[in-house]
Image (spheres, helix red, strand yellow):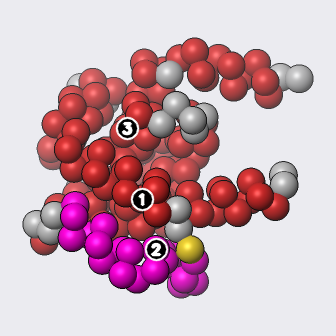
Amino acid sequence: MSKKSQTKGRLRTAARLAAVQALYDMELAGHTADRVIRDFAARGSIADLDGEEVPADPDLFTALVRGVSTEHARLDELADGAMDGKRQIANLDSLVRVILRAGAFELLQRADIDPPVTISAYLAVASAFFGGGEPGFVNGVLDRLAQVLRSEDLAASRDNSDG
């Protein structure tokens, strides 16, 4: 892996984590997308990654926060459809809910990012906050969403990894 792609990946990882934290803040405190984006920029687009302050991709952060805040009803419908029928996103823990919304948004709107990368990234985010079954649950829901939303991309990813 090149240094450029490692840096890009690390910037995106930090942006995802910061976006989930901001979305959680929005859900609990009622802050607006504009406010959390402004606060993030004022902090220098820095995320806390396991106690280390690292630069984050401000464009991905902004896209996630704005996209999830404007499309959350559609994202919730998609997530509900990808669950086992016994659960609904409205009844999940707030943090799990925003992780699923962010992952669903990225799968739906970011064709430039391979679905396995997105799924793995949000599995890592869930694992950073939870030690129980939540990461596996997030992984399963996002995998089912990817099968519906990005099946062609998943097939291409598998074909490219075979060789």
Q: Residue furthest right?
A: 163
Can you see residue 63? Answer: yes
Q: What's the mark number on residue 45?
A: 2
Can you see residue 87? Answer: no
In front: label 3 or label 1: 1
Give the spatial CA distance, label 2 vs label 1: 9 Å
Point 37% across, 57% down: residue = 62
- Quick check: marks 2 and 1 in contact, CB under 8 Å? yes
List x then y, in percent, for residue 71. Answer: 22, 39
In the rendered structure, does residue 49 fall within the stretch colored magenta? yes
- Quick check: marks 3 and 1 in contact, CB under 8 Å? no
Whichever of callouts 2 and 3 sits on the residue coming sooner in the sequence is 2
Residue labelled with disc 1: 61
> Which span is picked out in magenta?
33-54
Residue labelled with disc 3: 104
User: Callout 3: 10 Å neighbours few (<14), some, many (20+)?
Assistant: many
Under circle 3, the secondary element is: helix
Point 68% across, 19% down: residue = 156
User: Callout 1: 10 Å neighbours few (<14), some, many (20+)?
Assistant: many
Quadrant where the image shows the C terminus:
top right
Point 78% across, 24% down: residue = 160
Q: What's the mark number on residue 50?
A: none
Q: Residue furthest left?
A: 30
List x then y, in percent, for residue 116. Answer: 60, 36
Please state which amino acid type lies under the numbered disc 3.
Answer: Ala
Please state which amino acid type lies under the numbered disc 2.
Answer: Ser
How many marks overall?
Answer: 3
Residue 113: quarter of image:
top right
Under circle 2, the secondary element is: loop
In front: label 2 or label 3: 2
Is residue 13 positioned above or below 116 on the image? below
Classify residue 48 as left or right of residue 153. left
